[in-house]
Amino acid sequence: MNPYFILRVLYGVFLGLAFVIVGILTATSKGEPGVWFRIGYTYLSKRARERANRITGIGLIALGLLFMLSSFFLPLYGMFVLLIGGVAVVLAIGYIVARREYELDDISREAPEKPTKSIEPPRLRKYLAAQLFFAFILVLMSPKLPRAMAIVFGSAMALFIALTLLASRPLVFQLAPKFSGIMSRGFAKALTLVSALLTFGAFLAWMGFENDLLGVLLLPIFLLVIFYAAYVMLTSAYEEGYY
């Protein structure tokens, strides 16, 4: 049997099971404000929190099972595109459900925890502009990039831009306990850093360095950027009051 096929299936099963486990934990979470699916609507409304967690949990379980199944017939880059697209769909559905349930809850009762002051949306234009710039550079390089890399990186860039736009909307991240919009800016900054990393990786491939010693030497830098992006997200969530 083809060793590549075995490794692809093992990868699909491992990551798919991780999504299934996270989905089960999300769908069954009870009582914790904003656990797993953390946006402003779920903080303000218990009803929105419970419904959004349930729906997104089921979506993650379905995505995990589909990802495992896809490993038997899709190439690795196709699996990545499926994963990116699936996460985007689950997040979009979770956002729509949370917003709808919050609005229904707000109509049925006057929520005492609803903030009385107006909340200004965070200004994320510079992060969005940077991501659009990186996406434009990627499009220019794409004809000379490996097809799989161009598809996966392009899909990831599109998701990052969509998430940044979502983070700039009222009642998404900025309605945490302190209502300052710190998490939105941290989230957008982290996505911009990863966008820059993807663009630089594509540039190395475009220059023919993807299998060169330079690529190996830069691997620690790539990991450092990813860890720093995760750190920015977590610290901004802490400062906003989600933890």
Image: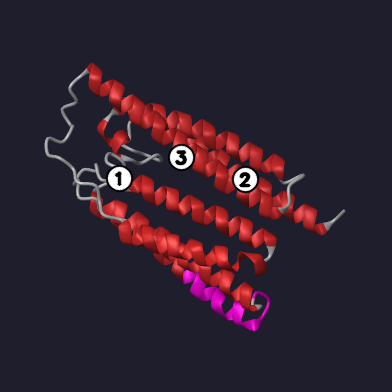
**Mark identifier at residue 173:** 1
Question: Which residue is rendered at x = 68% and y = 76% of the image?
Answer: 211
Mark yes or no: residue 30 visible.
no
Q: State the residue in front, 218 or 157.
A: 157
Q: Position of residue 188 (x, y in %)?
A: 36, 56
Residue 32, percent from left and from top = 33, 35
**Magenta-highlighted stretch: main secondary structure?**
helix
Please tell me which residue lies in front, 84 or 11.
84
Q: Amino acid at mark 1?
A: Phe
Residue 187: quadrant of the picture: bottom left
Are circles 3 and 1 on residues that touch, CB within 8 Å?
Answer: no
Task: Decide: few, some or many residues near mark 3? Use Cα within 10 Å; few <14, some 14-19, many ≥20.
Answer: some
Would you call the spot at circle 1 few (<14 residues within 10 Å), some (14-19), or many (20 or more)?
A: many
Q: Earlier in the sequence, mark 2 or mark 3?
A: 2
Local secondary structure at mark 3: helix
Q: Is residue 20 left or right of residue 76?
A: left
* Residue under numbered circle 3: 91
Tell me which amino acid carries mark 3: Leu
Please provide the residue range marked out in magenta: 210-224
Looking at the image, tell me whether mark 2 or mark 1 is earlier in sequence order.
2
Q: Give the crowd class for mark 2: few <14, some 14-19, many >=20 residues within 10 Å.
A: some
Which of the numbered marks, if any, corresponds to residue 82? 2
Give the Cα separation between the discs numbered 2 and 3. Answer: 14 Å
Is residue 176 among what the camera can see? yes
Instruction: Report the disc number at residue 12.
Output: none
Instruction: Pinpoint residue 242: horizontal percent, then vertical percent.
Output: 28, 46
User: Residue placed farthest to the bottom in the image?
Assistant: 213
- Does the magenta-highlighted stretch encompass residue 222? yes
| Residue at point 47%, 63% (across, down) | 195
